[in-house]
Amino acid sequence: ISACEESRQGQQALQLMGDMQAQGIPANTITYSTAISACSKGGQWKRALQLMDDMQAQGIPANTITYSAAISACEKGGQW
């Protein structure tokens, strides 16, 4: 997921998260933060915020990096 983030491949990062879930591998704060950052770099601000909602619904705590990535996604999408 981190490699997808670096190469601005938000959709691929989301696919990998889906694959993780299908394999029974739980996502955590780091996984979500990286995926949110990938969405930010890929211009997918709505999906980044959706991931934040998913985190909250699953009881996964957000941290400073998570919020920073979400804010960046909104800024890059002109939603600031």
Image (spheres, rainbow, N blue to C red):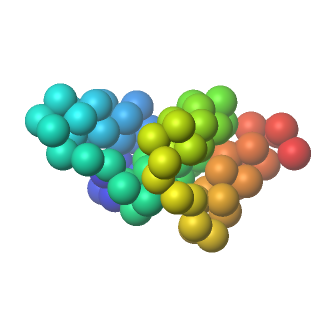
Total marks shown come to 0
**Picture residue at 63% right of the left edge, 70% below the top:** 64
Residue 23 makes an appearance in the image: yes
**Picture residue at 30% right of the left edge, 39% below the top:** 17
Question: How far from the left and from the top, in percent, is residue 24?
Answer: 15, 38
Q: Which residue is the extreme one toward the right? A: 80
- Up-down relation of residue 15 to residue 73 (above or below): above
Nearer to me, 38 or 67: 67
Residue 6 makes an appearance in the image: no
**Picture residue at 37% right of the left edge, 35% below the top:** 14
Question: How far from the left and from the top, in percent, is residue 74?
Answer: 75, 44
Question: How far from the left and from the top, in percent, is residue 15?
Answer: 30, 31
Judge left or right: residue 39 versus residue 80. left
Judge left or right: residue 7 versus residue 54. left
Judge left or right: residue 23 versus residue 49. left
Judge left or right: residue 24 versus residue 41. left
Q: Which residue is the extreme one toward the left? A: 23
Question: How far from the left and from the top, in percent, is residue 80?
Answer: 87, 45
**Picture residue at 73% right of the left edge, 53% below the top:** 71
- Up-down relation of residue 29 to residue 73 (above or below): below
Nearer to me, 14 or 5: 14
Q: Which residue is the extreme one toward the front? A: 59
- Up-down relation of residue 2 to residue 56 (above or below): below
